[in-house]
Image (spheres, rainbow, N blue to C red):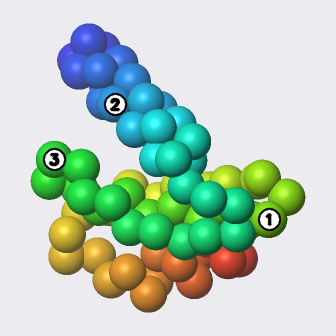
């Protein structure tokens, strides 16, 4: 069970870093990766946040959460 947790953590970390690196400053985006949607918000100062959710989770809720964080 620890092995599975580690691979999930690695997937989330790698995917988040890759999406943030490819996103422009001051942008919001949603990227489909495997069966997940990754919602990213990169502020103009370079601070970024990512929400990884399934396809059924509303995009609007994700970006509202990212705005508050």
Q: Dot 3: few (<14), some (14–19), or many (≥20) neighbours within 10 Å?
A: few
At 78% from the left and 53% from the top, the residue drawn is: 46
Which residue carries the number 3 mark? 34
How far from the left and from the top, in percent, is residue 5? 31, 24
Residue 58's quadrant in the figure? bottom left
Q: Nearer the viewer, mark 1 or mark 2?
A: 1
How far from the left and from the top, in percent, is residue 57? 29, 76
How far from the left and from the top, in percent, is residue 62? 47, 75
Image check: 45 left or right of 59? right
At 46% from the left and 83% from the top, the residue drawn is: 61
Marks 1 and 2 sit apart, C-alpha to C-alpha, by 26 Å
Which residue carries the number 1 mark? 44
Label 2's element? helix
Classify the position of the N terminus by image quarter. top left
Q: Dot 1: few (<14), some (14–19), or many (≥20) neighbours within 10 Å?
A: few
Marks 1 and 3 sit apart, C-alpha to C-alpha, by 28 Å
Label 3's element? loop
Q: Nearer the viewer, residue 57 or 1?
A: 57
Q: Residue furthest right?
A: 45
Image check: 58 left or right of 67? left
Whether residue 9 is visible to the viewer of this picture, yes or no, is: no
How far from the left and from the top, in percent, is residue 49? 62, 56
Q: Is residue 54 above or below residue 61?
A: above
Residue 11, numbered label: 2
Whether residue 40 is visible to the viewer of this picture, yes or no, is: yes
Q: Dot 2: few (<14), some (14–19), or many (≥20) neighbours within 10 Å?
A: few
At 20% from the left and 69% from the top, the residue drawn is: 55
Image check: 7 left or right of 43? left
């Amino acid at each position: 069970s620890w092995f599975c947790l580690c691979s999930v953590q690695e997937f989330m970390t790698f995917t988040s870093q890759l999406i943030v690196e490819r996103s422009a400053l001051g942008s919001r985006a949603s990227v489909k990766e495997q069966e997940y949607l990754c919602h990213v918000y990169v502020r103009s100062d370079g601070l970024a946040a990512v929400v990884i959710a399934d396809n059924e989770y509303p995009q609007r809720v994700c970006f509202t959460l990212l705005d508050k964080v």
